[in-house]
Amino acid sequence: MGGGPNIKVFSLVVGTVLFYALLANAIPQVQSEVPQELTLGAEATPEQLVQAGDQLYQGAGGCTACHGLGTRAPNLLTDEGGTGTIGARCGNRVPGMDCESYLWQSLTEPNAHVVEGYQPIMQDMRRTISEAQIWTVVAYLQSLGGEVTVTGAKVAESQTSEVNTGESASGGAGVALAGGSTDPEELISAGGCSACHVIGGQGGPIGPPFDGMGGRLDEARIRRGILEPNADTAQGYEAVAGTMPPNFGQQFNAAQLESLVRFLAGLR
């Protein structure tokens, strides 16, 4: 009889733990995926290219963090302002530029043609995935309402070029960002960080400001924010959670990462 209250307390604790365990499992988890090396050759079919591009777009490329929402960046998955899906409208965006060329430039020189009403926050996708992978994304976007003109031969040509120039086939250059420099200001510039973060009073308001970061966060938290940007969301920035690519931190080597962490921790 004396154990009754203890049993009730134990049951309450177990019930609470189970409830939050089920709740946690019901919440979609964002994972930092690494772009996988392409195995497609010159004989790849349009369907295979589109499938590979779809996987990158939805996963390791980090595209869905902004595109498809129609808020931070143009909606690419469905209609955008009555102009149709991206595959249908890409050939009409810039006079004299066909769809394939426009999409390629949009992914590698995103600030060349910023869609009215949006901020130039996108970075050159060659910083995170290879040129061959970018071509598959172009094929996927073309398939959304248009004709796929990207060929397996074009992807294979990019792969050969990357091998000859020493670039990684799994995305990004063979050497670290900024030519391997550990100067934090050079790393911030090369990474295009000021497009979203304010430093020295200059930059975009998309993400938390670098100014004063050391007074708010310790080195461990700053490091995690670079390597796992979706692990924590700064208060007040919930609406832009997921904007930073999940594999952004992979562009830095260990020395560069620690140099940047120490620099940001010193901004008070």
Image: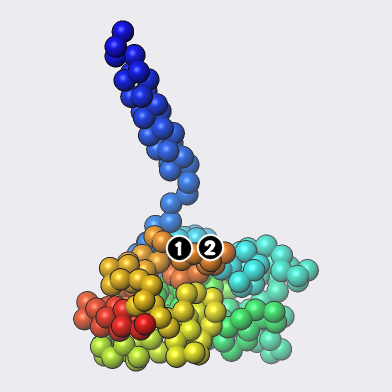
Q: Which mark is residue 68?
A: none
- Mark nearer the N terminus (2 vs 1): 1
Q: Residue at x 35, y 91 (%)?
A: 185
Q: Amino acid at mark 1?
A: Thr
Q: Please report the residue visible at 40 percent of the width from the left and 81 percent of the height from the top.
A: 212
Q: Is residue 119 left or right of residue 3?
A: right
Residue 105 placement: quadrant:
bottom right
Residue 97 in the image, given as x and y percentages of width and height: 65, 87
Residue at (38% x, 34% y) in the render: 17
Q: Which residue is mark 2?
A: 238
Q: Nearer the viewer, residue 136 or 75?
A: 75
Above-or-below relation of 28 to 188: above
Residue at the extreme right of the image, as rendered: 82
Q: In this view of the protein, which residue sits in the foreground, 168 or 31?
A: 31
* Rendering coords of residue 177 (x, y %): 32, 85
Frontmost residue, 123 versus 25:
25
- State the image quarter where residue 231 is shown: bottom left
* Amino acid type, mark 2: Glu
- Which residue occupies the extreme top position in the image? 1
Residue position for label 1: 233
Apparent side of residue 223 relative to residue 255 in the rendered image (left or right) = right
Residue at 42%, 38% (x, y): give it.
Answer: 20
Image x and y of residue 157, in percent: 40, 80
- Spatial CA distance of label 2 from label 1 is 6 Å
x and y, in percent, of residue 175 in the image = 26, 84
Q: 65 above or below 130? A: above
